Amino acid sequence: MLPSNSAAQRTSDSGEFHDADREAMEAKICESLETLSQINVTVMNHESADEHVLQQRVDRLVRGFAEMHEMKDRLNVNVPEEVLAYIRDGRNPDGFTSQFMERVASENQFTNGKISALTNFKQEYEKKLKEFFPEEAAEKLGRQQSTAIDGTGQ
């Protein structure tokens, strides 16, 4: 079982203790999965002599779950509700991550398209402004450049 860290240590800004706690939890989860696999093999090859081995493995699994339960309060992990729903539906959370990344890339491309369109519009607007209203354009564009330099933005 892991030694308990003080609250001050657990809330340190370095994140060092959270990483250690997270890694310990991951190790416990892997141990539990291995124990479940061993239980499966024992049950599939069930013989009366294996009952003691099965009982030991079930006890090890229960102890592992108890240790994970004790460790849970030291972890601060926020899982999006959408991911939990994805898992509840029996789907792989990697699929959620993949779909999310595709959606973000698509939205990013859309936003970049808007930025490009507005930049092109601004350039064309300034060009036409200079062409049809040269005096006003010089005054307006000069004023915009000076405010951009001094940072007032007005």
Image (tube, rainbow, N blue to C red):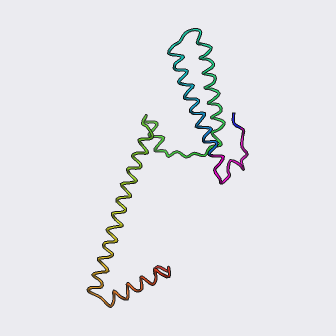
Give residue 58's position: percent from left, percent from top: 60, 21
Q: Position of residue 153 (x, y in %)?
A: 46, 79
The single residue placed furthest to the bottom in the displayed view is 135
- Give the x, y percent position of residue 81: 49, 44
In this picture, is 128 found above or below 40? below
Q: How many marks?
A: 0
Question: Is residue 8 in the magenta section?
Answer: yes
Measuring from the top left, give residue 111's x and y in whole percent.
37, 62
Residue name at image x 34 percent, y 70 percent: 118
Quarter-wise, where is residue 107 in the image? bottom left
At 68% from the left edge and 52% from the top edge, which residue is drawn? 12
Residue 6 placement, left or right of 51: right
Q: Is residue 33 magenta?
A: no
43 vs 10, left or right, is left
Q: Nearer the viewer, residue 154 or 12?
A: 12
Is 123 drawn above or below residue 73 in the view shown?
A: below
| Quarter that holds the N terminus | top right
Give the image quarter of residue 122. Answer: bottom left
Range of magenta residues: 3-18
Residue at screen point 36% across, 63% down: 112
